[in-house]
Image: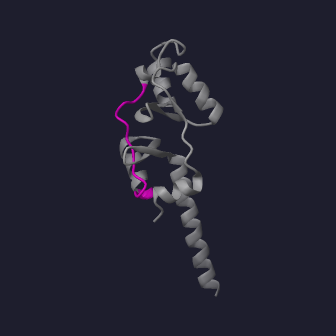
Amino acid sequence: MVTIRQLLNTKGQEVWSVSPDASVYEAMEIMADKGVGALVVLENDKLIGIITERDYARKVVLKERASKQTRVEEIMTKAVLYVRPGQTVEQCLAIMTEKRSRHLPVLDGDNLVGIVSIGDLVKSVIAEQQHVIEQLEHYISG
């Protein structure tokens, strides 16, 4: 079973963040520029929240708020789900499914060491299954 530590070693540990005082518009610009659907919210290098495209759609667009005047801390999710590096991809997929989450920050102690998306996890599962298939094919063909 692949652990989140192994996944991050392959995928990379780069994490995009925003401050709680930034405007939601600035956060959306970063997401668009980096091609990501979520940003962790850091204050003094500590994880205090996460802001996602879903937060934007539900808490800004649908409420007809102005993204340039709304601060990230006003709409961010404060009760952040997170995982540890030793957890498996399968465990994280179960958490995401149960909690309907698409992004999980990875904490080692109190230190943010990465973030994984549902796409990262699915890609890992597919790669692992492909490896097993290739091994079985090699075994069968001799």
Magenta stretch: give its range. Answer: 76-90
Quarter containing the N terminus:
bottom left
Instruction: Give the residue displayed 57% in from the left and 44% down from the top.
Output: 14
Q: Is residue 132 above or below residue 100?
A: below
Image coords of residue 6 (percent x, y)? 51, 60
Q: Is residue 93 above or below residue 63?
A: below
Image coords of residue 74 (percent x, y)? 41, 20
The prevailing secondary structure element of the residues shown in magenta is loop
Instruction: Give the residue displayed 63% in from the left and 36% down from the top.
Output: 35
Residue 78 forms part of the magenta stretch: yes
Instruction: Give the residue displayed 52% in from the left and 56% down from the top.
Output: 7
Q: Is residue 136 above or below residue 79?
A: below
Residue 102 forms part of the magenta stretch: no
In the rendered image, the residue lying farthest to the front is 44
Q: Is residue 76 left or right of residue 129?
A: left
Q: Is residue 27 left or right of residue 82?
A: right
